[in-house]
Every structure is written in C-alpha cells, then in structure tokens.
Amino acid sequence: MLLTIKDIARISGCAVSTVSRALNDHPDVNPETKERICRIVKEYNYCPNRNAKFLKQSSGKNVLLIAKGNVNLFFTPILEQLQSSAGKKGLSVTVSYISENDNEITEAFRLCEEMKPIGIIFLGGNVCIFQRDFSKLTIPCVLCTAYAGKLGFENLSSVSVNDFQGGKAAAAKLCELGHRRIGILSGDNKSAGPFCERFSGICNALSEYGINEAERFTEICEFSFRSAYEKAYKLILEHSDLTAVIAMSDIIAIGAVRAFCDMKLKIPDDISVIGFDGLELADFYTPRITTFHQPVEKLADISVKMLVEMIENNDEASHILLDAEYVSGETTKERGIL
Amino acid sequence: MLLTIKDIARISGCAVSTVSRALNDHPDVNPETKERICRIVKEYNYCPNRNAKFLKQSSGKNVLLIAKGNVNLFFTPILEQLQSSAGKKGLSVTVSYISENDNEITEAFRLCEEMKPIGIIFLGGNVCIFQRDFSKLTIPCVLCTAYAGKLGFENLSSVSVNDFQGGKAAAAKLCELGHRRIGILSGDNKSAGPFCERFSGICNALSEYGINEAERFTEICEFSFRSAYEKAYKLILEHSDLTAVIAMSDIIAIGAVRAFCDMKLKIPDDISVIGFDGLELADFYTPRITTFHQPVEKLADISVKMLVEMIENNDEASHILLDAEYVSGETTKERGIL
DNA sequence: CTGAAAGCGCTTACAG
DNA sequence: CTGAAAGCGCTTACAG
C-alpha cells in the first residue's frame, strides 16, 4: 500500500494541510518544517495521488500537451523538444495522445475539467475542428504545426512553417530544374490546414511558370508508405511522361521512391522526387530525399514561449510563420534533354 | 462547466448512486431507469470525471498499458493492435508512455494506486529492472516483446519472439550464403534482454559454422540511425574485409546501409546486410532490407489473451516464444568469389 | 506560520 | 430496485 499524505503528516508531526503546502511550494511555511517534511517524503518515497490532486486543484503549473496522431515520425522529435523546453520553464506537462479520428477540442475540454491546466499546446490538429469547437476553451492555447491566424480566437496562438511558401518553393525548385510535367502526391487538401496551404503554394508556383491547371496531375493519398506507393504507381501509369513529383511529406516521398524503383525508373535520372518535413529518416534513406525541413526545435521552443507569455503577461494571441528550409538530397536533378 | 453526476441525477430524478450504477452496468438497476439515464447522459454529453472515478474505484475493467520508449517504430503497430485487441475483449485500456530511462515498475506501482487496474501489459521493458523490482506488483501482468520465463514470478507472463533462435537464424543465413567475415551491429547486449539473446544466438550459429571468437567483429550502437551509421562506418574502416553485417534491428540496418552507400560499397554485391524486426519501413527502403519479422499481431493478441486468462480463470503465468519470420529482401546475396 | 474542516466528483457498502 | 451517507486523497479558504 502506498503512503498517503496522512501518513506523512503523522510521521512528521504536522497537519495534513501543512504537508500539502510544503509539497506545493507555498510561501507561507516555515523553512525548517518544510525541510523536515521533504526529507521524510524522500525517505519514504512518498508520491502524491494525482487523481486526488487534480480532483481538487484549481490551478498549478500544469500544462496540457495534446498530440494528435502519434504514429507520426514528424511529431515525435517535436514532442520531445516540447517537453524539454516546457520543463526548463518550470512547467509540468501532461501529455495526452489522441488518434487522428478523435476530436482534440472535446478531449482538451474534458481534460481541463480534470486537470485544471493553465494552458494547452496542441501538437497537430484539424483547423476545421478548431474553427467549429475551439470557443469552448477559454485558457491560453497554442497550436503547433498549423496556422490558426485566420480563425481569430483571442486565446489561440499558433506557430508553423509557412506551408504556402514551402509548397511554392518546392514546385519552383522543380520548375527551375526544367521540369514541366510534374505530379503532385498530396495529403488531404480538401479542408483547411497544412496540406491545403502547400497545395495552394504549389499551384501558385506552377502558374507562375506557365504550367496551367490542365497540366497538374494530382493524387490524394493517406499518410502512409503503402498508400503513397499505390498512388505514385497509379500516377505514373496514367501519366508516363512525368519527370518530377512533389510529395507533401517525406513519408509520401519514400513510398513514391520505392514505387518508382519497382517500376524500374531511375531516380533522379528518369524522375525527380521532392519531399516535405525533413525527417531524420529522409537523410538516411537511399537515395537521400530532397526535402524542405521544418525547424523542429524552433517550432517547439516558440510554442512554449508563446504559451508562457500568454499566461504570465496576458499577451494576446499571435501567429508565427517560420520558413521551411531547403535540404538538398539525391532525388532531384535537371530534367534530362528528351 | 462540465456536468457532474449530480446534474444527471437531478435531471433524471434519480439518486446519484443510481446514476452511478446505471453508468457502470451494475446488474441491479431497473432497465427503464437505466435507459432514461443513458438517454440523458447522451443528450447532455455527460462524461464522468476520471479523477473522481479512479480515486474511489476499487475494481473495474481497466487495464493498464505501459509502453516504454515511445520513439520506437516497432512498438507503434503493436500498441495499436494491443488497444484494438483489448477493446474487443471488453477491457478499457489506459496507456501510459514512459521514456527509456524511467523505471517501468515504479510507474506501474504508482498507477496501480491511482487507477486500480485489474492487469497490466508492459510493451517493452528492461528484464533487469523486472528482476529487481517486479515483486512490488501483485496483479496479473504480461511482458510483451521480452522473455520473462527465467524470472519466475507467479503473476508475470511474457510473450516474445525467440530472440536466441532469431539471432541464430540470421547468422546461419549469412553463413549459408558463404560469408565468413561477418560484422555484428548490436544494441546493448550487456544486460539480459532481447539484444543479449540475439547476440548469444548469433554467436552460437557462428560457432557451428566454425567461425571462432577471434573472427567476430562487434560494435555496440544506440538505437538510432545516426549511431548505427557511425558504428557501421567504424566497423568497415577497421575490418575492410567484412562481406556481411548482422544488424540487431532494422533501424540499425538502415543506418548501416546508408553508411555503406556513402563508402561506395555496393549492396549486396560488396556487402550483405541483414536486419531484425521486419518494420514496414524495411519493406519500403531501397534496397529492401532482408530481415526477420516479429509477428506484431500475434504478439499483441496473445498478450491480451494471456492477461484475460490470468484474470478470469486465475491461470498461472506462462511464457510463449514465437518464431521470427524470415523476410527476403534486397540486401543479402552469396559472397562473391574473391 | 499552522491546524481543523469542507469539499472536489465519484463509488459502494448499508438500509430499506 | 433505489436512496442517503461515508469516504477515496488531496487542496484551500478560514481561523487562530
């Protein structure tokens, strides 16, 4: 049986309330008393029951981190950085992993009641769900990896790469290399969000290079190697004259590269591929994936910084866009002279 | 403000205790009352506060799932399968992710007090920590992906691949292809656990093929692309005559393949590489990684089945070893005639 | 600076 | 089958 706060009170000869105050760093407790209590706590390896704590607690230093879709190679390093960055600011973070199909706002709302956090960081999230449901939440929140500036909520900041510019730069890069028959392997770009932004950016660049809508060949794929593989295969079967493909994430790029290899297409001689995200994996794949890197550390650090400033200084919501950084790889080259 | 059970009681005209019983499927509640309560619960979107629930609850259908080291591509699919498999058995699972450096037993013990689960599944875990600390836990537990048979705890079952046989088969495969100068890229094989088992298996096979200890070239790497890359590089620099490498996981194999490419070694013409785990990624890498696949679905399903039987039938602990399945890829071939 | 007491939202004997 | 009441382990006004 684990010890309770009552046991610690008994052993230390204090009241339960004094132990609680000592443990939670309240100012009005005698330093000697506090030290004695802490010693006993350590000696007996006492650990407060979080259910009871959260049931009562109205405030604290707890920050909630809601990660949507944890299967994601891209989110894992951000998550680690978020945790370490929040830790340095003296915040204790509780992470909740939810699946791609869950409603992040509903989950956040429930956890707010349970944990009474002072702020929330969403790692990933569906902008449409935010638009519809976010008003339920009244504490400071930050959306990390998607732009929430268009939503206009007073307590919702966001930090992400400029996905429009990133998409545009990726397409421009291929056009500069002389490619004109370019396929697009997109994530779901129907509803607002990063894929939609990237898609707009890509189209914008293609237009500037005089490639009109009739010459854009797009397949929508799920966020998996297999789906990307299948859609890449289909794209080439239907448009054998493509010389380049833009994949909206490195996962998709890898699925595509594998498909092209199986079709006996040489990369980058027969076809160029450009990815997005700049995963560590992209750098260890053969061939190295040419990609646009999302600055993971910055995304995480800025998220935490924004949240802290909203909480402590009552700063109003702001929306920061970072540049995705071009990473040269082995999957792109100039279009061969046909 | 979220609704509490009191609100539901007031709205439905019942007592709080009746609402509680209805919600928790207790037998002794009038079907009509129950239906009315459930309708109201749904209509008002009521969701019980888990802190309060767990604070009181002495039993239930809660199963705890402790996943150690969530950065792991191998664990993610097992985790998903475990959740779906447990869901089908009518168990509600709570997942706790802990880092590689945490003590899984300490964490389990704390959560037992808080959640009062009826059983625990550990996804991954350090056998040495189990040996030292597991006796603290008295409820049925299953260790998934490592063998706990040597530990002899009455309430700890385990299911894993036969890592010794897997390692042995991997080494034998290379020997059969004519390789005699074989490098080993190992995870930490100093303390008991899968890497240690695989290492023993590898050594056993090499001995059987007459390759003595002086001809085994081993580097220990961390579980990352980068570490594997560096150690693979080092291995070749120091032993340029190696014709094959056994990597103890696909992550390590991929780091090695990338390193060999950068050293201008052709795979598999100049050097063969064999991995372990059978990640989806291994099948989408170019070249496809030859590997030994851990049967993810079986590992998960058996874990749940074992736990349920320990709980419901009071079955005693058992330890199941599955075979790792050979998956032919593009990174192995016969040793060239020198 | 400290203690006694109320109460967070639930569950579960106990009584009817 | 249902309700009133105790209590889970904490935190926090309130009094001193």
Image: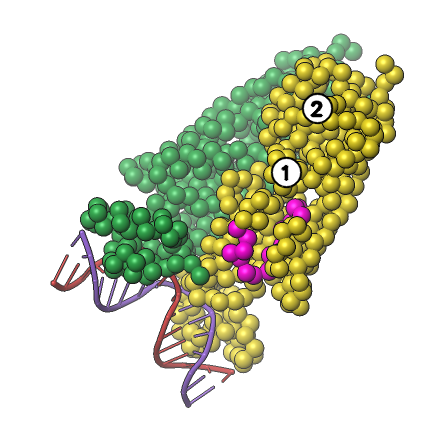
Chain colours: A yellow, B green, C red, D purple
**Image position, residue A286 (x, y; %):** 74, 26
Which secondary structure, mark 2? Answer: strand
Q: Quadrant of the N terminus of chain B?
A: bottom left
Q: Nearer the viewer, residue A321 or B226?
A: A321
In the displayed structure, B158 sits above or below A183; it is: below
Determine the residue positioned at 63% across, 13% down. B176
How many residues crowd mark 2 within 10 Å: few (<14), some (14–19), many (20+)?
A: some
Up the image or down, B327 lies above or below B199; here it is: above
Q: Quadrant of residue B216?
A: top right
In the picture shown, does residue B220 fall above or below A272?
A: below
Mark 1 vs mark 2: same chain? yes
Horizontal and vertical percent position of residue B238: 79, 29
Q: Nearer the viewer, mark 1 or mark 2?
A: 2
Residue located farthest toward the right when viewing the structure as drawn: A337
Could you tell me the amino acid type at mark 1? Leu
Q: Say whether disc 1 or disc 2 marks the residue closer to the N-terminus.
A: 1
Relative image position of residue B21 (x, y in whole percent): 27, 52
Image point 67% across, 48% down: which residue?
A147
In the rendered image of this protein, does residue B22 appear above or below residue B233? below
Depth check, front residue: B82 or B205? B82
- Residue range in magenta is A133-147
Residue that numbered label 2 is attached to: A217
- Asked if residue A332 can be seen in this view, the reply is no
Decide if residue A135 is on the left or right side of residue A314: left
The answer to whether A265 appears left or right of C1 in the picture is right
Give the position of the C terminus of chain B as an image quadrant.
Answer: top right
Letter of the chain that mark 1 sits on in the rendering: A
Give the residue number, with chain letter if any, for mark 1. Answer: A73
Q: Is residue A121 magenta?
A: no
- Residue B64 falls in image quadrant: top left
* Residue at the extreme top of the image, as rendered: B337
